[in-house]
Image: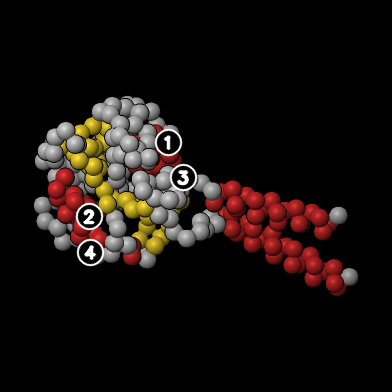
Amino acid sequence: MKGKTWQGMAAAGLLLAGGVAQAALVPYTVNGVDVVVDTDYTPVGATSPGLMWTKNANLAASMNFGVSGINANGSMTWAKALEWIAAMNTASYAGFSDWRLWSALNSDGSGPCGPGFNCNDSELGHLFYVEGGLSQNQAITSSTALTAVFTNMQDSVYWSGTEYAPNPLNAWNFFTDDGFQYPDNKFNQYYGWAVRPGQVAAAPLPGTALLMALGFGAMAVSHRARRRLW
């Protein structure tokens, strides 16, 4: 009976660890850089789910990668945002060279949705409405699910990398202060948030669950050793 007890505890610990590891937004440190992977979103053109975001949602305010013309608060024009992304790729930020602005297209390549609220299948729309659990007229920083894994999110406007087809002077953006997706003039000063497709190998066990699993495993080894002494 005692043997079954520690085996059940170990299995419970591993099950708990596995369950926690399945969270949709998974933080990682890759080559010394903090990122967050949305593990249940499949970007346009990708064959498997996984969209990596920079953990710092206003990275340009602290890292301009040598690009001039970015405002001290991190905001910039659409063209400057593309230049910043290009410089980030030249620098192989976090070891990758395929960073881009988030896409306003739906995950199946249709759209973009809008102008309007509840555009929950664009990359930032999915993060806001689905992962963040937010509704229209709520601000992104009011989501505890997002503030738990991201830093420096702005209740403002973020450029997408998607141009507005009817008017090439405009590009799509997302108002993170209320959840509105909208095309606007490329000369406006908005924020940039870099993403790239893909995940980071296998999801690691979170610290608490991993320690529990290891602790239960140690209990199993200790129990077996005592039985041999008996």
Q: Earlier in the sequence, mark 4 or mark 1?
A: 4
Please tell me whether mark 2 sits on a helix, a strand or a loop: helix
Q: Secondary structure at mark 1?
A: helix
Task: Give how far across and how far down residue 57 sits, in percent.
Answer: 30, 48
Residue 131 position in % (x across, y down): 43, 39
> Of 184 and 72, which appears nearest the observer?
184
In this figure, which residue is indicated by the disc labeled 4?
A: 90
Work out whether 65 lies above or below 157: below
Circles 3 and 4 in contact, beta carbons < 8 Å: no
Residue 19 makes an appearance in the image: yes
Tell me the CA gap for discs 2 and 3.
Answer: 24 Å
Q: Quadrant of residue 183?
A: top left
Q: Which residue is label 3 attached to? A: 40
Residue linked to disc 2 = 85
Percent of width and height locating residue 79: 14, 48
Amino acid identity at mark 3: Asp
Mark positioned earlier in the residue sequence (3 or 4): 3
User: What kind of residue is marked 1?
Assistant: Val
198 relative position to 5: left or right: left
